[in-house]
Amino acid sequence: MPKRIAASDEPSDAMSEAYAALGTANYDALPELIARLDAALEQNPDRGRLAFYAGVMRLWRATGRPLTLGEQFNDVTQCIKLLERARELRSNDPHVNAFLGAAQTALGNATKDEARLAKGRQVLEDAIPLYPPYVNGVVMQALGALPREHPLFADATKAVLAVYEGCGATEAEIAARSFEYPAEHTLGTCWNGGIVSHVWEGANLIAGDVFVKQGDAESAKRFYNNAKRSATYNRSPFHEVLDRRLAEVDDRTALYLDSDSANDPPTWMDEHNLCVGCHYDKP
């Protein structure tokens, strides 16, 4: 019989290596990491964190690697099963609930399954009180990935502003779409640190893309410029992406506003660096 992995071994083994892989954008490590997480979960079926990591590593692979549609579908459906299992074990965990809602929303969008999409949206809505700035950050990504004409897309911009409200921004700052980087340590979602070395830059880049997609170039510029106010911006690996966004913001917005949806530019949610945009720290 395989040796049961002790609870004290969890953080220092496969899960900590999953953190490290995100922090270095090490996609090549994913197959082995997923296999190890699956094996650990089989031996420790009551460990909700293991189920969570086994799920989100699949979601990272589905969004971060050029896979076939079948491979993506398999990863996302397996992710949902694992996150549902994690939620049974950790019902009040905001990370579990947020990622489950996002995965269900993504699958519903990809398969044109409005019932699943609505289910994912409800999971996200119910999770907001657990950790408002964090869950709203996931909401803006999940709903911001929807087609511009979808009824739920408008809620993405509301979620953007709710992130900053949850981070303690004033009404004036929210109205101006202009936020200074916090002068001292605050909530994890509002401050770079730990395993999210560039969450400030990533969140503002995503927010800018959501407003471009909505057709509001001026707000988008302000969010893109907010990203540059991070104390560690010079270590973010996506300077060139942000510079291009600022240079092209008016043209990109115009493409969303014209009558040809086929020429709409991809958002950060459509590209292959969604997860590492916040986690990857340049050496």
Image (tube, helix red, strand yellow):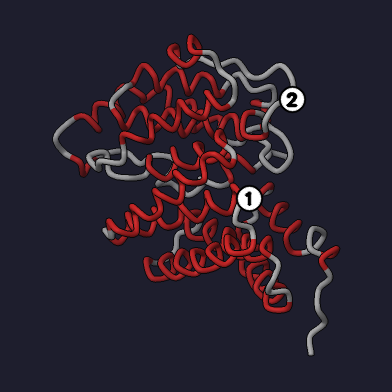
Secondary structure found at label 2: loop
Residue at 69 percent across and 57 percent down: it is 18
First in residue order: circle 1 vs circle 2: 1
Closer-to-camera residue (110/92): 92
Badge 1: few (under 14), some or many (20 or more) residues near its Cα, within 10 Å? some
Residue at 32 percent across and 45 percent down: it is 146
158 in relation to 37, above or below: above
Query: Total label count?
Result: 2
Residue at 55 percent across and 35 percent down: it is 132
Closer-to-camera residue (16/48): 48
Residue at 51 percent across and 40 percent down: it is 128
Q: Amino acid at mark 1?
A: Ala
When asked about the image quadrant of residue 282, the answer is top right
Q: CA distance from mark 1 to mark 2?
A: 25 Å
Q: Position of residue 272 (x, y in %)?
A: 48, 49
User: From this viewpoint, which residue is outermost toward the left?
Assistant: 259
Badge 2: few (under 14), some or many (20 or more) residues near its Cα, within 10 Å? few
Q: Which quarter of the image is occupied by the C terminus?
A: top right
Q: Position of residue 161 (x, y in %)?
A: 45, 25
Residue under circle 2? 185
Closer-to-camera residue (243/80): 80
Residue under circle 1? 25
User: From this viewpoint, which residue is outermost toward the top?
Assistant: 172
Q: Which quarter of the image is occupied by the N terminus?
A: bottom right
Secondary structure found at label 1: loop
Q: Position of residue 13 (x, y in %)?
A: 79, 63
Q: Amino acid at mark 2?
A: His
Asked if residue 136 lies left or right of residue 115, the reply is right
136 in relation to 89, above or below: above
Q: Position of residue 129 (x, y in %)?
A: 54, 39
